[in-house]
Amino acid sequence: MQGLNLGKTRPKKTTREVHPLPAASPKELQARLGERKVLLEVSQRRNYSYDGIAFGATPALVVLPESTADVVEALRFARQMGLPIVPRGAASGLSGGAVPIGESLVLSFTRMTRLSVDPHSRTALAQPGVVTAQVSERARPFGLMYPPDPASFRTSTLGGNLAENAGGPMCFKRGVTGDYVLELEWVDDAAEVHRLERSAYDLIGLLVGSEGTLGLITEMRLRLEPLPRHTRTLLASFAEVGQAAEAVSEAIAAGAVPAKLEFMDNGCIRAVEESFRMGLPVEAAAVLLVDTDGDDPLVVEEELSWVAEACRAHGGVVQMAANAAESEALWRARRSVSPAIGRIRPKRLNEDIAVPRSSLPAVVREIEALGRQYGLPLVQFGHIGDGNLHPNVMFDPKTDNEARVWELLHEVARVALRHGGVLTGEHGIGLMKRDFMKEALDPVTLEALRAVKAALDPSNLLNPGKVLPTP
Ligand SMILES: Cc1cc2nc3c(=O)[nH]c(=O)nc-3n(C[C@H](O)[C@H](O)[C@H](O)COP(=O)(O)OP(=O)(O)OC[C@H]3O[C@@H](n4cnc5c(N)ncnc54)[C@H](O)[C@@H]3O)c2cc1C
C-alpha cells in the first residue's frame, strides 16, 4: 500500500474518467451503477431507517456499493445533490450512528465482502462489509486469529467495528479494534480515495472510532495473532456486586492478565436462566466469567489460580470448567445476555460507560442503587477488565414513563463521569449521547473536535448530526 498522500492521491482515477460528471438524478445513478445497487422504492428504503437501538427517517435513497469506485460515485452524487451520507454496516450499532436523520443517502457496505488472509505477513486484507467472525474463521486454518470480538461478531461488520472502535471480551488482554488496523483505504467528503499507513499524525487513529463522520472506510489491512494453544475458564459467584468488582482489581494486581474477564449481575443471570437454562447460579448477586490463555499449560493454570484466589479473597465461590465443552457452555451463557434481557420488558435502553478499574466497586454499587431508586428493572454486564459496563434499563412504553428511563440513563452516565470515566467504552456517541458531550467535555476540547470535523468534512456531508452536539 502507498503511504499518506492526503488530498493528492487519486488511485481510482478510472472512475473519474468513465464518469466525468456525477449522476444528476437518482434514476441516473441507478442506471450507472445498476438497478440492484440503488434502492429507490420506499418499501426497500424503509429497511435502512434503524440500527440496534433506534428508528429514524426513511432515507431518500439507498446505495449498496460493491467496490470503492461505487462509493466514489455515490459520494459525488450526494455532493451534487447536497444529500448527507449515512454509512451503514450491519446496523447492530447501539448508539444510533447508522440511523438516518432527515433527507439522506444511506450507503450500506454489506456487499463489499472481499477478504483474504496472508499467513506470511499475519495480516488480513478486507473490505468493510465483511462480518467480523469471518476473519478469525478464515485465519484459523493458519493457526491465526483476529482478536477483537464484539458480542455481535456474528452479525456486525468490520466497517462498523472500525467506525466504533469496537471492543469485546478478548480485548482486555489483546487490545481493541483500533490496535489491529495496520492500513486503511478511505474516501473523503470530496469523493477522493486515500490510503493510509500508521504514521504521525495518526490519521488511522482518528478515522477509527469516528463513527462515519470523518470519512468512509473502504478497505483495511488487519493484524492477526497466533492462536493460543491452551485456554482455561472459571466462573466465580459473589453475594454482592461490589465484591465481584473488587476481585477484578485484585486479580490484575496479582499479575493476572486474563484473556477474557466478564461481569454479569443477578438480573442478567436470572434472565439467561429463565430464557435458556444454562445452569448459572441464580442466587448470586453477580458472577465473573474468566479465561486465561497461552502456549504453556502450566502458566495458563497458574494465572487462573491467581484469579481464583483473588475471587475467593472477596467472598467468591469458584467453579472451574472441566473441559472445552463446559467452557463453551459458559461463554454461550454470556453471549445470551443480550437476547435474554430483551425479554424482560418490550423495550430497553443500553448504556455503555467505561471507568477506571479502581472505581468499579463504587460504580457498580451506585448503579445498582439507582435502579432501585427509580423502581425500573436495571441490569449490568460488561467487559469489566476494561472497566467497561453496560447498564441496561428495560421498560414497557405502555406502562412506564420513557422520560424517566432516559433520566435514569443520564444518571448512570453521570456516575461514570463523577468517577473519572467516559461516556462510551465501545458503542460510540452517535445520536444517543451526542447532547451529553457538552457535559462530558470542556468547551476547548469540543471546539477542537469541531475543528477536526470541519477540516476533514468541510461540506458536512458525512453522517452530520452524529457525535457532536449542536453548538
Ligand atoms: C447483541 C449485541 C451485542 C453487542 N456487543 C458489542 C460488544 O461486545 N462490543 C462492541 O463494541 N459493540 C457491541 N455491540 C454494538 C455493535 O455491534 C458494534 O458497535 C459494531 O461495531 C457495529 O457494527 P455494524 O456493522 O453493525 O455497524 P452499524 O451499526 O451499521 O454502524 C455503526 C457506525 O459505523 C458507521 N459505519 C459503518 N460502516 C462504515 C464504513 N464503512 N465507513 C465509515 N463508517 C461506517 C455508521 O455510520 C455508524 O456510525 C453489540 C450490539 C448488539 C446488538
Image: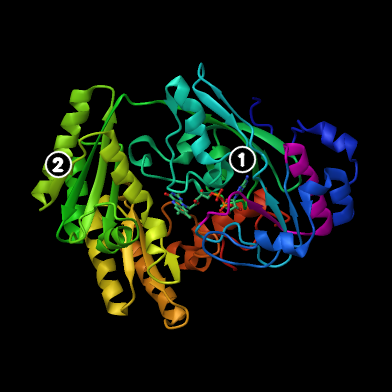
Residue 83: quarter of image:
bottom right
User: Farthest top residue?
Assistant: 120
Residue 82: quarter of image:
bottom right
Residue 232: quarter of image:
top left
User: Mark 2: is the Cβ under 8 angstroms from ligand 1?
Assistant: no
Q: Quadrant of the C terminus?
A: bottom right
Where disc 1 sits, the SS reads loop
Q: Earlier in the sequence, mark 1 or mark 2?
A: 1
Q: Residue 128: which numbered mark, if any?
A: 1
Answer whether residue 352 is visible to the viewer in this image: no
Residue contact between numbered discs 1 and 2, judged by CB atoms under 8 Å: no
Question: Residue 238, percent across and down?
Answer: 16, 56
Question: Residue 23, percent across and down?
Answer: 88, 50
- In the image, residue 390 above or below residue 193: below
Q: Say whether residue 199 is magenta.
A: no
Query: Are there few (<14), some (14-19), or many (20+) residues within 10 Å of tag 1?
Result: many
Which contiguous range is marked in magenta? 66-93
Tell me the residue that label 2 is attached to: 308
**Going 52% across and 68% down the picture, which residue do you hit?**
435
Question: Residue 310, percent across and down?
Answer: 13, 44
Distance between the alpha carbons at the discs numbered 1 and 2: 40 Å
Please state which of residues 43 and 94 is positioned toward the viewer in this rendering.
Answer: 43
**Going 90% across and 41% down the picture, which residue do you hit?**
20
Q: Say whether residue 77 is magenta.
A: yes
Q: Judge left or right: residue 447 versus residue 141.
A: right
Query: Are there few (<14), some (14-19), or many (20+) residues within 10 Å of tag 2?
Result: many
Q: Quadrant of the N terminus?
A: top right
User: Mark 1: is the Cβ under 8 angstroms from ligand 1?
Assistant: yes
Q: Amino acid at mark 1?
A: Pro
Question: Residue 213, percent across and down?
Answer: 62, 53
